[in-house]
Amino acid sequence: MPFKSSDNTLLYSTTPVTDNVTHVVQAEAGYSGNYTMDGTTFGFGGTIVASPGGLTSRNEDQYFNTSRSGAKANYLIGRGAFSFATPLPNDFSLHGSVNAQLASGNLLGSEQLMMTGSSAVRGYQDGKIYRDEAIVGRFELHAPSFGLVDLLPGLSQNLADIDLPAQDSLTFLTFADLGAGRNKFPIAGEDSTVTVASAGLGLRYFLGPLISVSADYGWELADNADVITDRSSRLHLQVTIGY
């Protein structure tokens, strides 16, 4: 049974920041799986989250409502995920994922679905928009992968001399993302429904199991959210080094 304690709303959306302590205590049950059909790999999953409320002194409606107007300590959340990867001619491939959430009422920011950022609709600021109920789709066209090590004479041996893997992979891609969401019971001044969309370019690089790089540059295409005042673009970069 996950437990979370928070004393502010700084990371979540643009609701007023408070110093109110809330305890999130909830039970979760889920199922996930994957299968392959005609060369295409599918993944799926679903989770039910339930919070009865009243389990600690700060797991009460009055504290939830202070952090987020209309939020209650008892709620239900349903989350679903779907993904696929399918090969295309000439070693291209198409990848996609969809994440969705439904809720019984207004939620604290930590339980809302993030709609923008590196793991959602790219090109927008991470965590700029959260919603109680939302769906986010991400779709990528991958070009054929190739290695850089073999293209540079002597590099493979130099890597081997310092005990680094000599097998690498670089993939370029284009992407299109879109999302739509709403708050269950909007309060005055909130957008009833928001939509966001973006497109961009990216790359994935792997050097053996030790180094991975993910870089995406996205352009905001369309949105109707009041918190986004102009069209912009943004780089999302992640570097992972293992040892």
Image (cartoon, grey):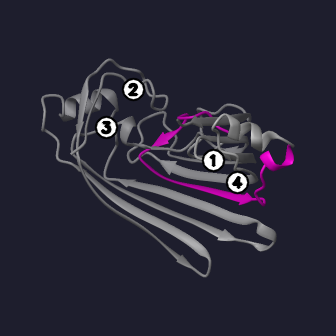
> What percent of the width, then of the height, locates residue 48?
30, 57
Seen at 77% across and 68% down, the residue is 91
Seen at 83% across and 41% down, the residue is 154
In the rendered image, which residue does mark 4 sit on?
176
Q: How far is mark 1 from mark 4, CA to CA? A: 28 Å
User: Pointers 3 and 4 in contact (CB under 8 A)?
Assistant: no
- CA neighbours of label 2 inside 10 A, class few (<14), some (14 to 19), many (20+): many
Return the mark for residue 70.
3
Return the mark for residue 208.
1
Q: How far is mark 2 from mark 1, CA to CA? A: 40 Å
- Camera-nearest label, 2 or 1: 1
- Camera-nearest label, 3 or 1: 1
Q: Secondary structure at mark 2?
A: loop
Q: Give whichever of 62, 118 is nearer the camera.
A: 118
Mark sitting earlier along the chain (2/4): 2
**Quick check: can you spot residue 162?**
yes
- Camera-nearest label, 2 or 4: 4
> What percent of the width, then of the height, locates residue 189?
49, 33
Q: How far is mark 3 from mark 4, CA to CA? A: 34 Å
10 with respect to 120 (left or right): left
Q: Secondary structure at mark 4?
A: strand
- CA neighbours of label 1 inside 10 A, class few (<14), some (14 to 19), many (20+): few
Magenta residues (range): 123-152
Mark sitting earlier along the chain (2/1): 2
Q: How far is mark 2 from mark 4, CA to CA? A: 30 Å
- CA neighbours of label 3 inside 10 A, class few (<14), some (14 to 19), many (20+): some
In the rendered image, which residue does mark 2 sit on?
9
Residue type, numbered disc 2: Thr
Q: Give whichever of 115, 203 is nearer the camera.
A: 203
Mark sitting earlier along the chain (2/3): 2
Return the mark for residue 82.
none
